[in-house]
Amino acid sequence: MQILEMVVNGAKRAMILEEGRVMLSDALRDGLGLTGTKVGCGAGQCGSCVVVMNGEAVTSCTTLASKAQGAEIVTIEGLARGGELHPIQEAFIEANAIQCGFCTPGLVMALYALFCKNPAPDDVILKKELNKHLCRCTGYEVIWDAAVLAREKMNGTRKACSE
Ligand code: FES
Ligand code: FES
């Protein structure tokens, strides 16, 4: 047993980590109650569980929670500010790119990590990121539209990133 300490969405959090292979997705969902992070395949294939760890998009279902010791984590719960959605979240709504919403947090967090590093990625880079995600209901064209709209909303700046 160990104490896992992380900064999650800007706040210091600590939890008891039981023995065995506890994944970051379980630590966030079951340990901290942050159920916005979804677990689909549990095998690093669908992208639904993506969170940002130390500025990098990671599949939390394949990341051991112990690897997050001392890390800065951003989850979907950490994006809205003062009751305002993040521009990437707004873009998904405006583009009608959400149906069941299961894949959405992972897509939004992956785009957040990308835009924070590169606020104006070209289409090839943007598509490469989206290709890591599976969506079973909305369809990829509107997700593409949302990503392009999000890029426009970021307006080539990192101002919407909590760096
Ligand atoms: S649930 Fe983690 S990649 Fe599918
Ligand atoms: S909106 Fe349902 S899986 Fe993508």
Image (cartoon, rainbow, N blue to C red):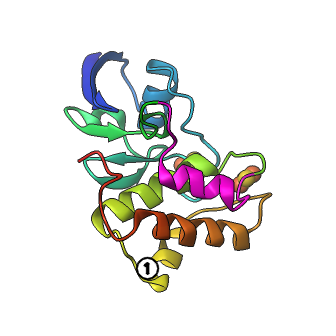
Q: Secondary structure at mark 1?
A: helix
Residue 12 drawn above or below residue 135: above
Amino acid tagged 1: Ile
Residue 97 at what x, y percent from top left?
70, 59
Image label count: 1
The residue at which mark 1 appears reads as: 125
Residue 38 drawn above or below residue 121: above
Task: Look at the numbered disc 1 and say if its residue's Cβ is closer than 8 Å to ligand 1.
Answer: no
Task: Give the quarter of the figure containing the N terminus.
Answer: top left
Check residue 94 for magenta coloring: yes
What residue do we see at 56% from left, 46% from top? 105
Crowd band around label 1 with a 10 angstrom C-alpha radius: few (<14), some (14–19), many (20+): few
Q: Nearer the viewer, residue 66 or 125?
A: 125
- Residue 150 in the figure: left or right of residue 73: right
What residue do we see at 67% from left, 52% from top? 93
What residue do we see at 37% from left, 57% from top? 113
Which quarter of the figure has residue 45? bottom right
Residue 133 at what x, y percent from top left?
59, 62
**Can you see residue 67?**
no
**Can you see residue 54?**
yes
Q: Nearer the viewer, residue 122 or 127?
A: 122
- Residue 22 in the figure: left or right of residue 10: right
Q: Nearer the viewer, residue 62 or 77?
A: 77
Residue 84 drawn above or below residue 161: above
Check residue 109 for magenta coloring: no
Looking at the image, which residue sits at the far left?
A: 70
Residue 77 at what x, y percent from top left?
48, 33
Residue 139 drawn above or below residue 69: below
- Residue 120 in the figure: left or right of residue 7: right
What residue do we see at 77% from left, 58% from top? 136
Residue 81 at what x, y percent from top left?
42, 35
Q: Which residues are magenta?
A: 83-98
